[in-house]
């Protein structure tokens, strides 16, 4: 009987500890922003994870370059060459604010307005030029 009471006490203690540890975890918030072609097909997707310092950029087509421009004066803030259809953008190098993201594929230039909020999730409004 003592063994049974001891087993129940240990079980309840471990369940209580597990429940407390689980509530202390910070949950990751994932936001996806999708820009589509006029025919409705997905052109680019930007994924913003609250626990990451990077935005993940993926395109339906391979792209060779992306640029981030100031929205107000279209001054170049950051650019990078790329091979393939996926890359990561370090959002900590950008001040909080709204920018224009241009993704260059062989056939298109895809443009999205993005809002960077380091420490909080950004918002992206999208269009294609």
Image (tube, rainbow, N blue to C red):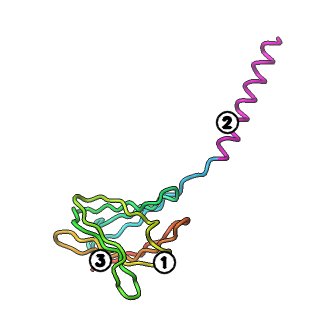
**Circle 1 residue:** 97
Per the image, label 3 sits on a secondary structure element best described as: strand
Residue extending farthest to the bottom is 73
In front of the other: 44 or 74: 74
Lower sequence index among marks 2 and 1: 2
Binning the other alpha carbons within 10 Å of mark 3 as few (below 14), some (14 to 19) or many (20 upward) gives some
Lower sequence index among marks 2 and 3: 2
Q: Residue at x 40, y 83 (%)?
A: 71
Residue 16 inside the magenta-drawn segment? yes
Up-down: is 115 above or below 29? below
Q: Residue at x 37, y 75 (%)?
A: 126
Q: Which is in the foreground here, disc 2 or disc 1? A: 1
Lower sequence index among marks 3 and 1: 1
* Relative horizontal placement of residue 47, taking residue 5 as reference (left or right): left
**Circle 2 residue:** 18
| Alpha carbon separation for disc pair 2 and 1 | 40 Å
**Numbered-mark total:** 3
Q: Quadrant of residue 76?
A: bottom left
**Mark identifier at residue 117:** none
* Relative horizontal placement of residue 50, taking residue 76 as reference (left or right): right
In front of the other: 112 or 91: 91
| Alpha carbon separation for disc pair 2 and 3 | 48 Å
Q: Which residues are magenta?
A: 1-24
Up-down: is 19 above or below 12? below
Per the image, label 1 sits on a secondary structure element best described as: strand
Per the image, label 2 sits on a secondary structure element best described as: helix
**Circle 3 residue:** 128
Q: Main secondary structure of the magenta part?
A: helix
């Amino acid at each position: 009987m003592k063994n049974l009471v001891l087993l129940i006490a240990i079980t309840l203690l471990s369940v209580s500890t597990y429940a407390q540890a689980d509530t202390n975890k910070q949950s990751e918030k994932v936001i996806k922003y999708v820009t589509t072609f006029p025919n409705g097909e997905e052109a680019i997707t930007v994924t913003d994870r609250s626990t990451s310092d990077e935005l993940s950029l993926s395109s339906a087509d391979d792209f060779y370059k992306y640029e981030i421009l100031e929205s107000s004066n279209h001054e170049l803030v950051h650019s990078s060459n790329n091979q393939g259809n996926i890359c990561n953008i370090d959002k900590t190098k950008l001040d909080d604010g709204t920018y224009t993201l241009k993704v260059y594929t062989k056939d298109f230039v895809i443009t999205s307005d993005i809002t960077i909020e380091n420490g909080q999730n950004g918002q992206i409004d999208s269009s294609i030029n």
